[in-house]
Image (cartoon, rainbow, N blue to C red):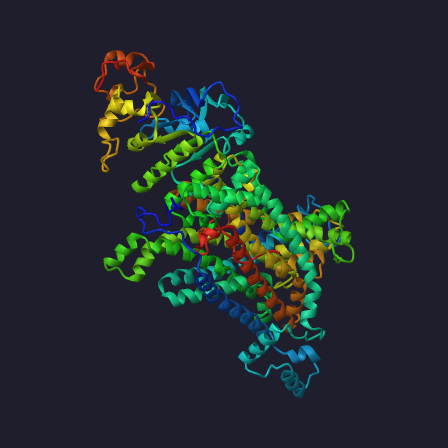
């Protein structure tokens, strides 16, 4: 007896198995655009504005103190700085979309080149740090949830609280003290490319990556623990037990799928931060990354470089956001239908 | 309020408040009560370890570390406070307003909020100092602006929760003015959440100040700051590996006290609402984005 | 109403030769709750034979749910089996460890619960959840598992396209069919249904009952059906076990018990729940309250609310006696024919 339409449900209307409509996706895309497009525009405009505002005297930066008034006018024209702000912004954005982020005032090196040179450093950091945070934080959080209420759980909570009081660069300094100064196991500064020397790469990147993984790791542990404790209490976990599925399967396939959301959101938040914003850790470990570059450029008023890096960071945030949303939608398709 | 009373009953609150009082005292009177002049160089004792004369040793210029830390408290604490006040002023008011001022304002304020959240903290602070002047005041103003989203989200979520409560509808029906309703009913309920966020924001701001002063931004040497002390320690790490412990400890203790305070306020105000004790997370309120378990603060203070 | 258990129409080639046709045998089960010695089930005994459907009926808190959970090994946190035995097809499972239970659950016993929506993972399609069980328990490769899942859906009256739907997209009745499909997917010997029809509309209830009966006849399933609804029990069960305050007070063939209950509580139940009247099915008109869980009472636990109580009833615990083709826990069972 095939059934396509059930009778009236208590409290509800006629219920059928709903077909998936393409228009729903279009509507969702529209809603997404209404949120993200203005943010992208505003974000890029702010970064552009900051750069322009800080530009007290670009001609002096480029030419030095002996710039004559004619030189200043000429330089301003060459740099396009005599145009109205919005026009400048428009030009900058359109060039950026084609991959041209301008040229450094001082070194004449294209900004995109400088960024490209330093990106591998931050990417290495990000990959390693996020992986560590995910694995260690995830395992700890899951363990604390499964053994909820036990001394393991309380210990994990306490460690997380204590760990959140230490800034990453202090952890970094501490690691340097232990591993570089005292035991002379790992180098305390510098960077070696992965393709040049894999072992050296790991040696140089290990300490900063560990230092950077602490904060996201703590968040992952907390979020996962809270979510998992809640999920493990749900009836569908009992249902899975009654179906004779193994504990491991229930945890990894059924429980984590529903509990991983907040933890993944947190990790997604940290990816662009580690890539574009770890100024201090790069300083501690003398890593030639984007953070160092943006700090030096901001200090010396090298505007195109600052604008370029801020743009890249904003783009990374938005990309990361998109990615996280997609992942969440894949994990829990039931939430938005 | 009963929440304050309940919070004070917890031992953790009292310990945290005690520590913060000490810090506040140091902020006010640190320079005056320090055993040595923070900039006085005792060239006979460079990078000396802890001793009877210098409880925390001396730095690379022979200056007493304890005195530098005590004197440096004011700058760090006041700067962090500045950021929190800015963040609260901008974020909390906007968050509150977004619920009552119509859909356009709501949409716009949310988009501004999102935009602020895409900007990296340290870089933004540095860029702002490039525009407004290279002092800590300007830098922490920038940090405050970037803390605003934290307050915005939390205030907005809390306001949404309470603004839709029945007693607000009733008050409205009875003819109370909008402002009165907001002040009497909504504000009182939103206050504890804002207090929790303020404590967490202060912790975050303090970490950011430490990072900025570590980088030398906004500081005019030889003025002492916690981050600045750490920075000079870094250069001489091989000669004095124990040196970073003192400034790091000061940062950790203060941040820890602030976090504990935030937790205990939250636990004390939660006791009415539901029986489940909150795990120690920094923010807790459900945001409209569906992050049911809290998310980290909007900025990233120390990277 | 048949008075003898039905013989299965299909025989299971893999079933070991057992000396008894009893799929489930619970003997003198004592279950405590809340990490205490509070006895929520006090000496319950019942059996379910192959192809037979047995109903557990009683108010909430009477111990029927805990007994059925004990049969599955899924007593909640704080609950424990204090004494007694649970035997599944002759094997003692009372103190079985988790690993051994894994082998039995899903494959030899299946379960259906009250709110199907909450017992299915909301983030995975129902088809994949069914296929998962079949794949892991029966060792089928993926494609075959999917085919079998679709076959099972059709066997319980669902369309094949249900396979790709999430639980949130299906109605309560359809989800209950999904749960039944999952429960019988590996051809178990026992189906446990805990308030399986309680959350459903009356018309859907009828369909689900019919489905369970059909599966029972086709596969020789033993069914343990827990409900507080006498009408459903009447339709579905060959034998009924009546629970009160943690004890079994009457056991016997459904037809007989409904026609002439011997225990005063059963009599009161029947008077209150007028079968066939869609309006009233509450068990609330018996004066007084059942004793709180784990209350220590000497003598009969129904005595305080019983119209026929004697002093002798309160002196010592009452044993179960065989009276008129059924088992009754009452000193005055013989006299109390209604």
In this picture, residue C321 sits left or right of residue A157: left
In this view, the residue in front, C54 or B88, is C54
The image quadrant that residue C305 belongs to is: top left
Query: Which residue appears at 32% of the width and 38% of the height?
Result: C206
In this view, the residue in front, C282 or B286, is C282
In this view, the residue in front, B25 or A10, is A10
Q: Which quadrant of the rendered structure holds the N terminus of chain C?
A: top left
Relative image position of residue C111 (x, y in whole percent): 44, 34
Q: Is residue A126 above or below residue C118?
A: below
Please indicate, yes or no, whether residue C55 appears anywhere in the rendered image.
yes
Relative image position of residue A176 (x, y in whole percent): 71, 50
Q: Which quadrant of the rendered structure holds the C terminus of chain C?
A: top left
Query: Which residue appears at 26% of the width and 31% of the height?
Result: C283
Please indicate, yes or no, whether residue B17 appears anywhere in the rendered image.
no
In this view, the residue in front, C98 or B258, is C98
Q: Is residue B121 above or below residue C47?
A: below
Query: Which residue appears at 34% of the width and 56% of the height?
Result: B163
Relative image position of residue A172 (x, y in whole percent): 67, 51
Residue at the far front in the pictured view: C9
The image quadrant that residue B158 belongs to is: bottom left
In this picture, residue B224 sits left or right of residue C264: right
């Amino acid at each position: 007896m095939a059934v396509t339409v059930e009778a009236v449900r208590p409290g509800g209307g006629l219920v059928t198995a709903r077909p998936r409509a393409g228009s729903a996706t279009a509507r969702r895309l529209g809603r997404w655009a209404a949120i993200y497009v203005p943010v992208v525009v505003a974000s890029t405009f702010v970064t552009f504005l900051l750069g322009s505002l800080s530009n007290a005297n670009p001609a002096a930066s480029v030419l030095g103190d002996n710039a004559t008034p004619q030189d200043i006018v000429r330089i301003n024209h060459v740099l396009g700085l005599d145009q109205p702000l919005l026009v400048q912004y428009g030009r900058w954005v359109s060039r950026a979309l084609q991959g041209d982020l301008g040229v450094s005032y001082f070194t004449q090196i294209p900004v995109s080149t400088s960024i490209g040179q330093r990106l591998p450093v931050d990417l290495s950091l990000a990959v390693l740090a996020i992986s560590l945070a995910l694995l260690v934080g995830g395992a700890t959080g899951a363990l604390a949830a499964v053994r909820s209420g036990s001394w393991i759980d309380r210990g994990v909570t306490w460690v997380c609280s204590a760990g959140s009081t230490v800034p990453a660069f202090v952890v970094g300094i501490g690691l340097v003290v232990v591993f570089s100064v005292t035991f002379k196991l790992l180098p305390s500064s510098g960077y070696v490319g992965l393709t040049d020397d894999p072992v050296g790469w790991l040696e140089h990147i290990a300490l900063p990556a560990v230092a950077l993984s602490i904060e996201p790791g703590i968040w992952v542990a907390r979020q996962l623990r809270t979510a998992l404790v809640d999920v493990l209490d749900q009836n569908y976990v009992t249902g899975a037990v009654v179906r004779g599925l193994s504990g491991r399967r229930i945890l990894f396939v059924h429980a984590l799928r529903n509990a991983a959301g907040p933890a993944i959101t947190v990790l997604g938040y940290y990816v662009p931060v580690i890539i574009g914003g770890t100024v201090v850790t790069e300083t501690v470990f003398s890593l030639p990354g984007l953070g160092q570059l943006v700090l030096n450029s901001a200090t010396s008023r090298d505007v195109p470089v600052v604008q370029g890096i801020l743009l890249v960071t904003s783009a990374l945030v938005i990309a990361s956001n998109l990615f996280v949303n997609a992942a969440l939608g894949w994990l829990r398709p039931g939430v938005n239908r | 309020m009963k929440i304050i009373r309940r919070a004070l009953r917890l031992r953790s609150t009292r310990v945290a408040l005690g520590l913060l009082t000490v810090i506040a005292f140091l902020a006010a009177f640190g320079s005056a009560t320090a055993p040595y002049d923070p900039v006085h160089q005792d060239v006979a004792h460079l990078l000396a370890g802890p001793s009877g004369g210098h409880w925390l040793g001396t730095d690379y210029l022979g200056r007493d570390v304890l005195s530098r830390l005590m004197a440096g408290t004011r700058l760090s604490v006041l700067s962090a406070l500045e950021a929190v006040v800015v963040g609260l002023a901008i974020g909390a008011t906007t968050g509150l307003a977004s619920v009552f001022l119509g859909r356009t304002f709501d949409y716009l304020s949310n988009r501004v909020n999102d935009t602020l959240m895409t900007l990296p903290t340290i870089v933004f602070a540095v860029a702002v100092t490039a525009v407004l002047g290279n002092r800590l005041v300007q830098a922490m103003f920038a940090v405050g602006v970037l803390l605003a989203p934290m307050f915005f989200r939390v205030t907005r979520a809390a306001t949404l929760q309470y603004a839709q409560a029945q007693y607000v509808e009733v008050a409205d029906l009875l003819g109370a003015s909008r402002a009165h309703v907001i002040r009497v009913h909504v504000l009182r309920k939103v206050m504890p959440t804002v207090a929790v966020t303020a404590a967490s924001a202060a912790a975050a701001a303090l970490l950011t100040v430490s990072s900025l002063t570590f980088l030398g931004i906004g500081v005019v040497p030889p003025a002492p700051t916690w981050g600045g002390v750490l920075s000079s320690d870094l250069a001489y790490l091989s000669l004095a590996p124990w040196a970073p412990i003192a400034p790091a400890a000061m940062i950790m203790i203060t941040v820890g006290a602030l976090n504990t305070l935030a937790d205990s306020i939250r636990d004390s105000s939660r006791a009415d609402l539901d029986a489940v004790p909150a795990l120690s997370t920094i923010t807790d309120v459900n945001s409209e984005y569906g992050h049911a378990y809290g998310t980290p603060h909007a900025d990233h203070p120390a990277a | 109403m048949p008075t003898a258990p039905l013989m299965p129409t299909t025989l299971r080639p893999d079933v070991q030769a057992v000396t008894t046709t009893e799929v489930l045998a619970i003997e003198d089960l004592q279950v405590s709750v809340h990490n205490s010695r509070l006895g929520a089930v006090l000496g319950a005994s019942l059996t379910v034979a192959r192809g037979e459907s047995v109903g557990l009926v009683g108010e909430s808190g009477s111990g029927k749910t805990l007994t059925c959970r004990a049969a599955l090994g899924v007593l909640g946190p704080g609950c424990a089996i204090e004494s007694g035995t649970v035997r599944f097809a002759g094997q003692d499972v009372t103190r079985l460890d988790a690993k051994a239970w894994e082998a039995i659950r899903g494959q030899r016993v299946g379960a259906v619960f009250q709110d199907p929506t909450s017992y299915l993972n909301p983030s995975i399609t129902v088809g994949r959840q069914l296929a998962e069980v079949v794949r892991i328990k029966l060792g089928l490769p993926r494609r075959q598992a999917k085919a079998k899942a679709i076959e099972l859906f059709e066997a319980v009256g669902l369309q094949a396209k249900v396979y790709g739907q999430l639980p949130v997209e299906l109605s309560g009745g359809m989800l209950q069919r999904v749960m039944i499909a999952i429960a019988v997917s590996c051809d178990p010997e026992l189906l446990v249904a805990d308030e399986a029809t309680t959350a459903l509309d009356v018309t859907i209830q009828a369909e689900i009952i019919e489905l369970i009966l059909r599966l029972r006849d086709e596969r020789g399933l033993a069914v343990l059906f827990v409900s507080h609804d006498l009408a459903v029990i009447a339709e579905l069960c060959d034998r009924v076990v009546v629970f009160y305050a943690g004890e079994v007070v009457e056991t016997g063939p459904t037809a007989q018990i409904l026609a002439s209950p011997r225990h005063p509580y059963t009599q009161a139940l029947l008077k209150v729940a007028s079968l066939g009247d869609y309006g009233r099915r509450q068990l609330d008109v018996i004066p007084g309250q059942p004793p709180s869980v784990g209350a220590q009472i000497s003598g009969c636990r129904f005595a305080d609310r019983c119209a026929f109580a004697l002093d002798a009833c309160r002196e010592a615990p009452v044993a179960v006696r065989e009276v008129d083709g059924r088992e009754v826990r009452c000193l005055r069972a013989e006299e109390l024919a209604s």
